[in-house]
Image: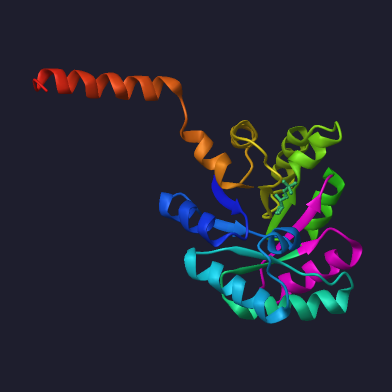
Amino acid sequence: MKFFIDTANLDEIREAYDLGVLDGVTTNPSLMAKEGISGEANVRAHYKAICDIVDDKVSAEVIATDYAGMISEGKELAKIDDKIVVKIPMIKDGIKAIKYFHSEGIRTNCTLVFSAGQAILAAKAGASYLSPFIGRLDDISYDGLELIGQIVHIYQNYGFETEILAASVRHSMHLIKCAELGADVVTCPLKVITGLLKHPLTDSGLAQFLADHAKAAGK
Ligand code: E4P
């Protein structure tokens, strides 16, 4: 299972990378705005700064919602760095754009996915990654994890190569359940990854080991 961090904050990306378990980064226009990044040149420079931290796979989202706009914006994003994955919304023109980028060998991440039908369309168009949003489904009383299971099953039935990138992952149990279900990737905030570290028996066990060692050493 791959871990992507879902942020545009460079310090958080560095911290996750330093942990040694990071496989990529996803961003979206809201996360860029949260960091105060705006204007074409600043946005490009920020994506480049992210690419310089990690080894591969940085999702950069198009703002255009029409086919021609998504193609031209996506091509510009892809030129920033070989690590860029062009993030395209799950809309009719988005599917056409994914098909185009697939034929050009440019990787895509189909975002804002909330149903199995959308997942089938994106895979048929040749998306490299599919981002079903678990937390946002849970927010409105749908079962986000059930959707992940459904998509894993469908993709296995047909051998679709699109990687399932579970998104809108809000807590560590979401991540663990995604692993059980067979999602290829999860993207989440740093605290979800560091949350995996925690167990009270680890803390108390380590404290006991250190105390016993100090006692034996006569300290
Ligand atoms: C995915 O690529 C999105 O950036 C993200 O996971 C959305 O998460 P949220 O619903 O917590 O905003």
- Please name the residue shown 78% across and 73% down the image: 100
Does any portion of residue 123 appear in the rendered image?
Answer: no
Q: Along the line of sight, which residue is nearer the eye, 7 or 21?
A: 7
Tell whether 191 sits left or right of 169.
Answer: left
Residue 151 percent location from the top left of the image: 75, 42
Q: Is residue 198 above or below residue 134?
A: above
Residue 131 percent location from the top left of the image: 73, 51
Q: Quadrant of the C terminus?
A: top left
Corner quadrant of residue 111 = bottom right
What are the residue bounds of the magenta stretch?
88-114
- Please name the residue shown 46% across and 53% down the image: 15
Q: Quadrant of the N terminus?
A: top right
Residue closest to the far left: 218
Q: Is residue 205 above or below residue 69?
A: above
Does any portion of residue 180 appear in the rendered image?
Answer: yes
Q: How is the image coloured?
A: rainbow
Q: Along the line of sight, which residue is nearer the eye, 33 or 110?
A: 33
Q: Is residue 119 above or below residue 97?
A: above
- Please name the residue shown 59% across and 33% down the image: 176
Tell whether 84 sits left or right of 20.
Answer: right
Q: Magenta includes 207?
A: no
Q: Magenta includes 112?
A: yes
Residue 75 percent location from the top left of the image: 71, 79
Number of numbered discs on residues: 0
- Please name the residue shown 69% across and 63% down the image: 32
Residue 188 percent location from the top left of the image: 62, 46
